[in-house]
Image (spheres, helix red, strand yellow):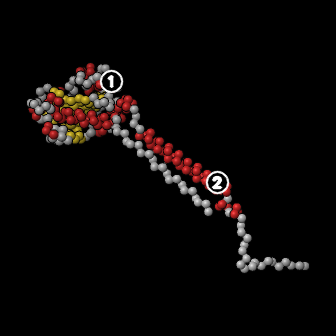
Amino acid sequence: MTTTTPRTAILGEPEPPHPAHTDPRRHPARVVAAALCVLLGGGLVGGAAFTTWAEHRAANRPIPADAAYRKAASLWRAAPVDSLLPPVLTGPSAGPGGANRTWTRIALAPDAECPAALAADWQNLLAATGCTRVLRATYTDATRSSLITVGMVFTPADARTMTSLKGRIPAPPAYGFTDAQRAAWAVSVPAEAPVVVYSVSAFADGRPGDGPRPAEDLMKKEATGAAARAGLGHEARAVADRIGNGLAFLAAPPAAPATPAAPAPTPTPEPNR
């Protein structure tokens, strides 16, 4: 029977080195796979960032003007009433001599069908354009000495047909006071929407006027009479302008500048060890 004496390690004797290819972190196949993962990951992140930017740009791209014009015909039911006929209107330098004005809404009529809200001459005028709906409200100035009716007549007409109305619109009807009390009136046909905006001013104490006159006539320096001195021409013109400007903003809001989404940072490949 023989025995084998186990080999005793000699102190200081170096261990045989491992082959370089046995280091799993430096295996060529693993290095290539890691590089591919980095490239593919960067491509996916970049693609997602581009898609987000494209969607953001499409959402903020304004619709064509003709489409926006047609869409504005439905604002009477699509927009909040307080955005169409605000509870308070301000008019810096809108009064006689550049005086500041403020108007408060004191009455709001339900949206109405055209025959119920418009006089016969207005119905005849709108026969060519059609008439969808009428919105009306009454405002008073800060001193409560004047009343201003404002109306918005929505139609399904195109821009050319609406433009043909300019210069042919008669004195508008009143809302909140009688026709005999009408003092001054103003109308406008915004370029952004198929709507006629009108306003009529009157004395709040109910006194009859001298007949409804165009606001511009009462705004002249040489204009005389109680309505002119009270600034009722200025009241009618200023309120109509503010309601019309608000409508134009709702119909065609300014396009917000497209801000591309910030791309995600590209992952940094892990250095080879």
Mark earlier in primary sequence (1, 2)? 2
Percent across and percent down for residue 194 are 32, 28
Question: For the residue marked with disc 1, what is the amino acid?
Answer: Arg
The disc at residue 32 is 2
Residue 147: tell me if it is visible: no
Q: Are marks 1 and 2 in contact (CB under 8 Å)?
A: no
Out of 186 and 115, give the one closest to the viewer.
Answer: 186
User: What SS does tag 2 mark?
Assistant: helix
Of the pair 171 and 218, the residue shown nearer to us:
218
The label nearer to you, 1 versus 2, is 2
Q: On the image, which quarter does residue 146 sit in? A: top left
Expressed as whole percent of the image width and height from the top left, the position of residue 76 reads 33, 32
Query: At 22% from the left edge and 35% from the top edge, which residue is drawn?
Result: 239
How many marks overall?
2
Give the labeled residue for mark 1.
160
Q: Is residue 103 left or right of residue 163?
A: left
